[in-house]
Amino acid sequence: MVPTLYLFDRFDGRLGILPAVGAVTHTEELGGEDTIKFDCLAAPEKGERLLWRDPTDGVWREHVVVRTDEPMGSPAHVYAESSLCELLGDFVEEAQLVAKTGAEALAAALAPTRWAVGDVGVGDAERGCLLYHVNALAALRRVEEVWGGEAETVISVAGGRVTARTVRLPARRGAWRGARFSYGKTLAACTRTVLEDEVFTALYGYGKGLPIYDEQGVATGGYTRRLTFGSINGGANWVGDESARLTWGRPDGSGGKAHRFGHVVFPECEDPYELRNLTRAALASAREPRVSYEVDVAAVKGGSGVRLGDDVAVIDSSRTPEWHLRARCVRRVRELGEGAPSVRLTLGTVERTTWAASADVAARVTAVEETAATASDTVASYEDLGSEEF
């Protein structure tokens, strides 16, 4: 059914109900878009707030009007973003986070805002980064990158008004709810995209580069070679997957198959055992093709209950041998109108941001930090690229 949209002004004063003309389209994706779009006869003002209860799971959601299209003689088209967008107007001048837990980092990112810190499920590992001259939303995204986790909002309502706005940081959104489908057999309304990312069957792992000091103990601006884990891995600074090599390896010139090598950088890692574990976790995502499936939910067994971040079993029978993949719902678009909602899911074999892109960005950022900063004020980034087995 079409959700009731309660309209509030920019200062949370209740204005009434805003009737939608037709369906309300809700689009959400991991680490990205959370918007609603709809038509209405009377256009709301920019910055006004829309509070509505999700008819699917009963969760309260809040969005802020950011754009209206108002053709003469026709309904206005409204585009609203998650109220988390208000963090764009809060500013973090400087916060040096050294040896902080995820909960402490989240509190620092939200300190200039009116949002509260919710449950944090990324563990008690102490890491660090520098939040410098950024808006609070960018600071929140940085905390997600460094400490891991996937932020989500919780809107608490009582007496017809928002009483609390909270940001949670679970290690991973979603769950396994039994949804599964088979591409090439029972599934029809689906588009498969095999992404261009390379498949690697072995990865070199590199950790932190340590600063070099002169005889007076002053940092020279140079750095030593990066940490490797060969000393605790039989002399090899890489880890490989033999089953992946047999499937995706390259010709070795003698009729066999050789590993396809890649590398990944964890700029803040200082322990060879941890570095090896992180590299193994990265390899779990790199050893098979990245495939994206865009599918109508009606074609997925158990698909009506799929939520953002959920795991889905995929059997791609169009390949020989069949691909048995674990996928995640990385994007969900729902048309909330009369009758059952129309839902379209985007399923990916890994998160939207690939490990390769993350490693590349981390390497570039670290190169700048290591060139410009001294040992006393440099807090490098930490990229947790692990993935859970499905």
Image: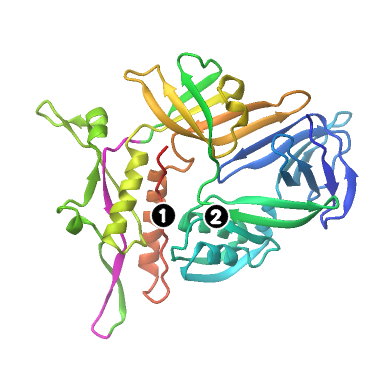
- In the displayed structure, 371 sits above or below 148; it is below
Q: CA distance from mark 2 to mark 1?
A: 13 Å
Q: For the point 66% across and 67% down, which residue is it?
A: 112
Q: For the point 28% across and 53% down, which residue is it?
A: 276
Of labels 2 and 1, earlier in sequence is 2
Callout 1 amino acid: Glu
Would you say residue 200 sits in the magenta stretch? yes
- In the displayed structure, 262 sits above or below 269; it is above
Q: For the point 19% across and 53% down, which residue is it?
A: 233
Q: Nearer the viewer, residue 57 or 264?
A: 57
Q: Residues within 10 Å of mark 2 (few under 14, many from 20)?
A: some
Q: Write down the residue under mark 1.
A: 383
Describe the element under mark 2 as helix, strand or loop: helix
Specify whether 111 is left or right of 3. Answer: left
Q: Which residues are magenta?
A: 198-216
Q: For the point 60% across and 36% down, which residue is it?
A: 307
Single out the residue that lies furthest toward the front. 178
Q: Nearer the viewer, residue 171 or 63?
A: 171
Residue 141 badge: 2
Report x, y in % for residue 376: 39, 77
